[in-house]
Amino acid sequence: MLQIAICDDEKYYRETIRSLLTKYLEKRGLTYTFSIFLSGEELLSLPENAVKYDVVFMDINMSRVDGIETAAWMRSHHSETEIVFVTAFIHYAPEGYKVDAVRFIMKDTLEAALPECMDAVLKRKRLEQVEFSCVEGHVRLFTDRILYVESRKHKSIFCYQGAEPAGYQVYLKLDEIEGRLKEYGFLRIHKSYLVNMKHVRRISNYEAELDSGERLPIPRLRFQAVKEEYAVYKGAL
């Protein structure tokens, strides 16, 4: 599921962006959720907002905390969120590129510019999906939203990062899930944990620290091999 945030202090543009995005996504059969923010301060109020969205459509010219400051805060959390600035003032563009904005869209060209912008976002995100028959039903999960998979007794539980964190349960062994997810950058750090290396901030002190703030244990006997494989992954990015 594609997680999208819209941050603008003008109701007209919030609703316009949401309507145009809904049309684009439904035409392509993509699942999605929207989170709406009326200001940069509101978005900044929850630390997890720094990393959990696939794309944020952000007004630049907002009172108190503007869009550039808000985007810089997100980047300070190692966020891979795609940022799209929606603005009436093109002179902000040089500042926006400092936070790796994928596009600047002028507010008077939204309808014409948004489809190409979303094409670029999806290309950059490389959104691969995997399907599993879970206790909760048949689900299709974006691989980059899976934080880790944990084995508990006879089930494996997906910790999935969305608008609300979710735990999907499946009656499969972790070995089988590892075989399906390894090509997407998943690493077995423990007999009970399969981790998405995209969400690992660092590996140290026999733990993997995730961008969600969670820390997962790594056994001493496995630690060096995990560190080396993670270093190879980071070098290949």
Image (cartoon, rainbow, N blue to C red):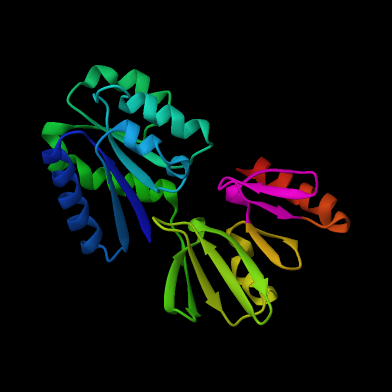
Say left or right for 176 vs 22: right
Tell me, yes or no, whether the highlighted magenta stretch contains residue 200.
yes
Please state, as top left, top right, bottom left or bottom right, where the C terminus lies in the image. top right
Task: Tell me if residue 54 comes above or below residue 67 in the rendering.
Answer: below
Q: Which residues are magenta?
A: 196-217
Residue drawn at (55%, 79%), measured in percent from left and top? 170
Residue drawn at (33%, 24%), measured in percent from left and top? 65
Say left or right for 215 vs 227: left
Please state, as top left, top right, bottom left or bottom right, where the N terminus lies in the image. bottom left
Say left or right for 141 vs 183: left
Residue drawn at (66%, 43%), measured in percent from left and top? 234
Percent across and percent down for residue 201 are 63, 42
Residue drawn at (84%, 50%), measured in percent from left and top? 224
Tell me, yes or no, whether the highlighted magenta stretch contains residue 179.
no
Percent across and percent down for residue 51 are 47, 44
Percent across and percent down for residue 17 are 18, 45
Task: Tell me if residue 9 comes above or below residue 134 in the rendering.
Answer: above
In the picture, residue 83 is in which quadrant? top left
In the picture, residue 14 is in which quadrant? top left
- Residue sitting nearer the eye, 124 or 83: 83
